[in-house]
Amino acid sequence: MGNLEQIDLSAVGDADKLPRAAPSPGAADQRMRMDFVAVDQLRVNRGYQRRLSESGKARIRKIVSSFSWARFGAINVAALSGTGELAILDGQHRAIAAAILNLRQIPACIQFSLNA
């Protein structure tokens, strides 16, 4: 860890002159938070997520057989309005592995949207 450097804004030139889209605090379609979520609240949207391929199944088996929180990372989910359910946006393999491992909760970045 001796090669750590601070983020270098000079790498992109005049960073202070770049046009910026200002986030709108509190806008329902832009809010998110990090939290632990219940695995049994996770849902797979087949309109968005592909069916598991053989390589995907192999990836799940590898996650299960060599599980480590250090390598797990947060999945990305969208809160489904009024249901308490969470649609998986990214992390389907990790979520399935978590269910196989009987984990009750896993870390997630939860996005809140009017259209979730």
Image (cartoon, rainbow, N blue to C red):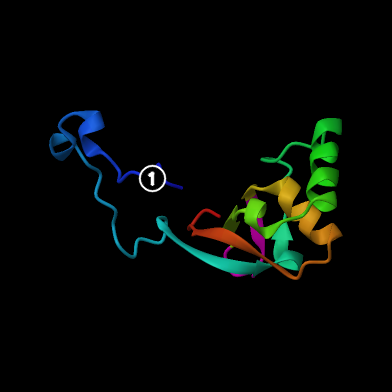
> For the point 78% across and 48% down, which residue is it?
63
Residue range (magenta): 81-88
Asked whether 45 or 92 is in front, the reply is 92
Q: Quadrant of the C terminus?
A: bottom right
Rendered view: 21 above or below 34: above
Instruction: Please state the horizontal and vertical placement of residue 81, each as a whole percent of the image.
Output: 57, 64
Residue 44 visible in the current orientation: no
Instruction: Please state the horizontal and vertical placement of residue 4, each as a whole percent of the image.
Output: 38, 45
> For the point 85% across and 45% down, which residue is it?
61
SS assignment at label 1: loop
- For label 1, the crowd category at 10 Å Cα-Cα, with few meaning under 14, some 14 to 19 and many 20 or more, is few
Main SS of the magenta part reads loop
Rendered view: 41 above or below 51: below
44 sits to left or right of 53: left
Instruction: Please state the horizontal and vertical placement of residue 3, each as a whole percent of the image.
Output: 40, 41
31 sits to left or right of 107: left
Q: Is residue 82 magenta?
A: yes
Amino acid residing under circle 1: Leu
29 sits to left or right of 24: right
> For the point 83% across and 52% down, which residue is it?
64
Query: Residue 74 falls in which quadrant of the image?
Result: bottom right
Q: Which residue is mark 1?
A: 4
Instruction: Please state the horizontal and vertical placement of residue 112, each as a whole percent of the image.
Output: 49, 60
Asked whether 22 or 105 is in front, the reply is 105
Query: Residue 53 falls in which quadrant of the image?
Result: top right
